[in-house]
Image (cartoon, coloured by chain):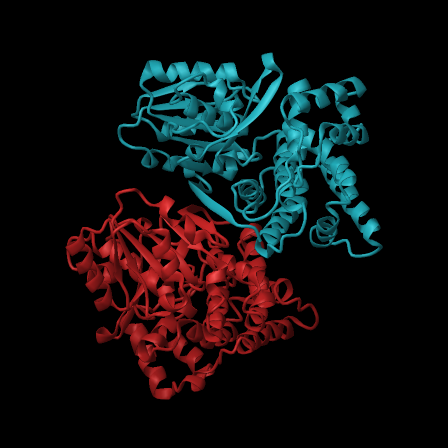
Chain colours: A red, B cyan
Amino acid sequence: MNNFDFHNPTRILFGKGRIADLNEQLGADAKVLILYGGGSAERTGVLAQVREALVGRTLIEFGGIEPNPRYATALKAVEMIGQNDVTFLLAVGGGSVIDATKFIAAAAMYDGDPWEILTSRGCVVTEAMPFATVLTLPATGSEMNSGAVITNPEKGAKLPFSSPHCYPVFSILDPETTYTLPARQIANGVVDPFVHIVEQYLTYPSDARVQDGFAETLLRTLIELGPKALQMPEDYNIRANLMWTATLALNGLIGAGVPQDWATHMIGHEITALNGTDHARTLAIVLPALLQDQRGPKRDKLLQYASNVWDIHDGSDDTRIDAAIDATRAFFEQMGIKTRLGDYDVGAAEIERIVTALQDHDMTTLGEHGAIAPSDARRILKAAA
Amino acid sequence: MNNFDFHNPTRILFGKGRIADLNEQLGADAKVLILYGGGSAERTGVLAQVREALVGRTLIEFGGIEPNPRYATALKAVEMIGQNDVTFLLAVGGGSVIDATKFIAAAAMYDGDPWEILTSRGCVVTEAMPFATVLTLPATGSEMNSGAVITNPEKGAKLPFSSPHCYPVFSILDPETTYTLPARQIANGVVDPFVHIVEQYLTYPSDARVQDGFAETLLRTLIELGPKALQMPEDYNIRANLMWTATLALNGLIGAGVPQDWATHMIGHEITALNGTDHARTLAIVLPALLQDQRGPKRDKLLQYASNVWDIHDGSDDTRIDAAIDATRAFFEQMGIKTRLGDYDVGAAEIERIVTALQDHDMTTLGEHGAIAPSDARRILKAAA
């Protein structure tokens, strides 16, 4: 096991009816800016629950945060904070709204050009406004971590940042808010955490029994319950288990003390930056091809994955590895997510643009060994064609 | 899954050589009181590492905290804090030293008779001094939770308290500090977390896949590595996995959203209060007898435990349950811990005193259904004779 730090101060309020507990989490004097997305929070009644819980407070609202949240949009919210003496931010939505809120919380306190938050080597964020979340779309894990990804279409860039100052103070997770999600979002909300877990698990052995066992539990939960969530959208326990799984997939716990990969994410980000494909779908495209390509360095963990996640025990090592990768692809397809670049109209020319973008964004030493260069990414992307 | 709150703000610094990182975790002006136990922290060199890491600071020390830490001892430390303008407490040791430090941190800020902290219904602690830990004996999980147990021999009482103000600010977990533990402490450090996990897992099904899977991972890790730790005391990865398992066994994670039992602990505390038996040993006595006694209400989870923890798949339901309980007892014995009251000179007369003590301490509705009365505890204890 490697040395590690683990610190996650976010308070989770989980379960039915928990939005009603919102008011008591906030200081009496908090001046709250509610941030949300494109209208689903209004349509599903979640925003109404939030306003009801906070009745009597002066609320300011900022809607219209888009999927793959944009830098320019975030800056408009920063401006609104300054004009209204806002002291607390409340994100109501999924990973995009929460990621935007993290960036807004940091940018509002940042002396200098906020673009530096996304582009500086090392962490330049020294403080951030306090913020909390009401999660309506479990997928990214942003509700219990300190990372965010912001898109700047003018620059063709989708860039991550993180800061220890950017953990939500609290997050409210009510599985019932997810009943109305369309199938596409349910599928994304299963595949995205699946790949988050794989990025922290499927590397090379480091004798971290607890982290491995936890990762395998989370993967098996997604495999078993993901398809059922599509069939039974209002089964509370299915939604509750999936929601908690997605949070634990990326809250630092399973990644503590183990090698991590993240190449699939970095390549996937470039696909989204190029053509706007849903984040989870880019991961479903890249991962199976990457696992095949990296089956040498990942051999021991691929065999463990085949056995402990997929119950594949028969045949030679290579046969079992092939079966596990095939099962992974089949699972994504079963969730209704296509796994080939061609399914998303990304052809040979676009592959070259993705490879160039990786080079431009210094994504030249990807993977747990730092050994995946843009030329390797080209080979992986061609295999995913 | 039940509704739950989860919040654990303790920072973990895990791994080789992490005591050297102690100084940077403390404010420049912190006036630190180091608390420790009976001499092993000195003998093993851990205290020397701590002093070395904090060289240049004015340090005050309070040694002599006993196993099953005593109320009167804790009050002496509180007095020392007042006399020396101490601002930060640093516990160096195992669960006893850390538990005492939690109580001292709360008592030092408490207006009124500190005995109320242990005896009041509801939580009376509204603030506590900041404190941290350097863990040398993984077992109780106290390094990453907010609970403590204090013994008052004059009153024949061993009483728990907890407060959200009593999480360590940080805890340093260096597995190498555990190499010198005697076999008895290693065994306690495996059996204590084992029973912590069982208390949160082996109740009745609540469709909490993640919590169940995590609990099963932790139990399997203890079963596999516990005996190896006795054979290979300086194997780093064995110690690291056991140390992290003991912490996660009682940091709130696996108990979030599930029913909990704790009857074994409450009965065990009375055994220790009566005759000073090691906490873990009292659990090893009570648990197998309690599982047999409660096999009806716990039936579904006992079958899951047999299958997922012990790989017992053959035979009737009752056969598999018997085999799982037998395996549990055999595991404790394999760790060198006797599992019968007679092994500790506790006879029929003492059983009656334990039953009376449960009654006196209002421990009259134990277990996940609140259905274990002192008369039921008598039956369980007689079965453990």
Quadrant in which residue B34 is drawn: top left
| B15 relative to A31 in the view: left or right | right
Query: What percent of the width, then of the height, locates residue A73?
Result: 23, 67
| B137 relative to B21 in the view: left or right | right
- Quarter in which the C terminus of chain A is drawn: bottom left
Query: What percent of the width, then of the height, locates residue A82?
Result: 16, 54
**Of all residues shown, which one is farthest toward the top?**
B154
Query: Which is nearer the eye, B222 or A42?
Result: A42
Query: Which is nearer the eye, A205 or A172?
Result: A172
| A31 relative to A316 in the view: left or right | left
| B316 relative to A242 in the view: left or right | right
Question: Is residue B300 at all visible to an observer of this figure?
Answer: yes
Q: How many marks?
A: 0
Q: Residue at x 61, y 35 (%)?
A: B189
Q: Residue at x 56, y 52 (%)?
A: A207
Question: Is residue A252 at all visible to an observer of this figure?
Answer: no
Query: Which is nearer the eye, B213 or A324?
Result: B213
Quadrant in which residue A228 is drawn: bottom right
Query: What percent of the width, then of the height, locates residue A87?
Result: 24, 49
Query: What percent of the width, then of the height, locates residue B81?
Result: 37, 18
Q: Which residue is drawn at 49% across and 37% down?
A: B145
